[in-house]
Image: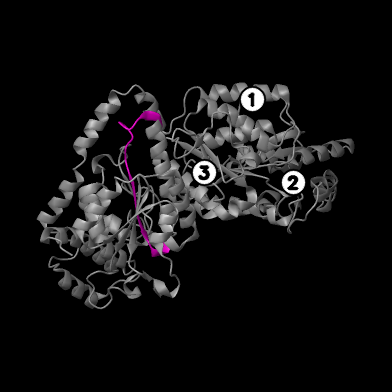
Amino acid sequence: MTNTAQQNDLANAIRSLSMDAVEKANSGHPGLPMGCADIATVLFTKVMKFDPADSKWADRDRFILSAGHGSMLLYSSLYLLGYEDMTIDQVKNFRQLGSKSAGHPEYHFAQGIETTTGPLGQGLANSVGFAVAEAKLAAEFGSDIVDHYTWVLAGDGCLMEGISQEAIALAGHLKLNKLVVIWDNNSITIDGAVSNSDSTDQIARFKAVQWNTIEIDGHDQDAIEKALNDAKKSDKPTLIAAKTTIGFGAPKKAGTEKVHGAPLGAEELAGAKAALGITYPAFEIPADTLATWRAAGTRSQNIRGEWQARLDAHADKAEFTRRMKGELPAAFEPAIQAFKQKLVEDKPKVATRKSSQMALDIINAVLPETQGGSADLTHSNLTNTKEMVPFQADNYNGRYMMYGIREHEMAAAMNGIALHGGLIPYGGTFMVFTDYARPSIRLAALMELRAIYVMTHDSIGLGEDGPTHQPVEHLTALRAIPNLLVFRPADAVEALECWQLAIESTSAPSILALSRQNLPALRTEYQAENLSAKGGYVIAGDKTADVVIFATGSEVAIAVEALKSLTEQGIAAKVVSVPSMELLAKQSDAYKAEVYGNAKVRVAIEAGIEMSWNKLLGDKGRFVGMNSFGASGPIDALYEHFGITAKAVVEAVTAQL
């Protein structure tokens, strides 16, 4: 290692702040910041393009700390670079309630945090979406206003997680050469040496999926700088394998698991500072070192000014600006209304997966920013439309992602696309495979992203494929995720309304749970108001009745059939379609009272389990559905087998009268 005194001083500023913050919190992970300080120093002070004065600059490079447990590396760097909201007090309040310096980087908490990381592999998986968005927008608007890199710092744990293979295989296939992953190759996990559990040749692995690879000493700043710049010349995504020592400088704990996830302790901290030549007090950085860091933070101000001038002169400035702000074009609402009128006139009897495609035909025509896709189920999910040419290595203009059989990476990449800005991602698979995508869906909800998951074959209506493919419990599991909108439309009009709501939602992701089987048209009168926006509304029957039948999706038609039988028996009832429990829960008490609040008899019907219905049903209500796994057989036979029928609904009502 041939670092100069100044290079060491700059890196030690990160180490000192990180060690002090973890020690003060008596909690955290000092090992990664100490081991990767040289990498961060070079990346932030010499290579990356960004401007703390405009943290949302559209053409900035993006940095993703996939190994999110090492968050003090990022917080220390943000403070040193001069990001306004990452003050020394925030550094001192590391991992404390209400601080911007949470235990793991949290999107929205502070400027310069591009995505929420912590679950290992997620940041790496997000980065593919960032790189896709950059490539797509550069192809569309030109490299004069879109030309930036996505830099990822990942650890051994990130590379062990299964999602990493999905991510790197897709990135290599797409030749996303502006994606650079720096591997903190320190050979240590929480349980000890990596060799205890893994013997993967990571270089060979990345090469096998068409990545460029570089190996360096992760503490040699000149070698780091050369590798980072060499990576920018590659026509493939690049892995930089940086050999580091976890807890670099700690006299007794460096290179061991003991420095991974616990404070150094007073004695080891003092020893580390002595070994590194850190003589200044805790949380104090020498003025000349801080000034050098702050000057590095202003490196790109002129570059940003030149970029702004190019944008101002660009023919598509207004469209690019609209897209990056996430605003919808004026044509969106009229297109929705015109198509709703057509649906009411045509009364199509189609599966809601087909209704979804019909809605997408309209949406994709007026929203050039939609970036669709499917995890190898395009012809089942019906997520493609005539505008959606595939996004491929030889055509970055494409609007349709061929994700392959990679449900988890699809969801994570969608998060990256949404986080990057300028595009609205949606992607499809079977509803049952939300199990494979759930961690990324949960993070989308946590980050309040506009990402839309098209989940078809939403119940036992899947039929003959049997229990493995029948998502009996999945609606309830998804409804349990805070800030996730779960839509289950009943017909083509509701499907359109739910798509509109998903597109318009800028602070929550959406699930569209769609049927395989054909469903009758239930909304046969045009109303400009989006009734699904209420989450639940009376779709049929006597609005004043004190017998209410709740239903969603394919079971709304069954509820309407039951309503006819009850009417013939002289029982006044109403059917409440509930396309979104989450939106219904947000309505006023007065609205809820009007729709169902005074009902003496309550029944819910859904081809799923009861749990999420308990609040609406109360103590005495009845559920018509399933609390067991499915079975194989034709659709009609399965509904009869499980008693999800109009007859069962009628019996549940009369039993309460």
- Of 123 and 613, nearer the camera is 123
Amino acid type, label 2: Gly
The colour scheme is: one colour
Depth check, mark 3 against mark 2: the one in front is 2
Disc nearer the start of the sequence (3/1)? 1
Query: Would residue 151 be counted in the magenta stretch?
Result: yes
Spatial CA distance of label 3 from label 1 is 23 Å
Spatial CA distance of label 3 from label 2 is 25 Å
- Of 600 and 398, nearer the camera is 398
Numbered badge on residue 509: 3
Residue 120 relative to residue 521: left or right: left
Amino acid type, label 1: Lys
- Tell me residue 374's x, y (percent): 57, 43
Q: Which residue position holds label 2? A: 461
Disc nearer the start of the sequence (3/2)? 2
Query: Would residue 207 be counted in the magenta stretch?
Result: no
* Tally of marks: 3
Residue 206: image quadrant is: bottom left
Residues rendered magenta in the picture: 140-158
- Tell me residue 383's x, y (percent): 59, 37
Numbered badge on residue 15: none
Q: Residue at x 84, y 51 (%)?
A: 655
Is the C-beta separation of discs 1 and 2 under 8 Å?
Answer: no
For the N terminus, which image quadrant?
bottom left
Amino acid type, label 3: Pro
- Of 564 and 590, nearer the camera is 564
Numbered badge on residue 340: 1
Q: In what element is the residue under mark 1?
A: helix
| Mark 1, other Cα within 10 Å: few <14 / some 14–19 / many ≥20 | many
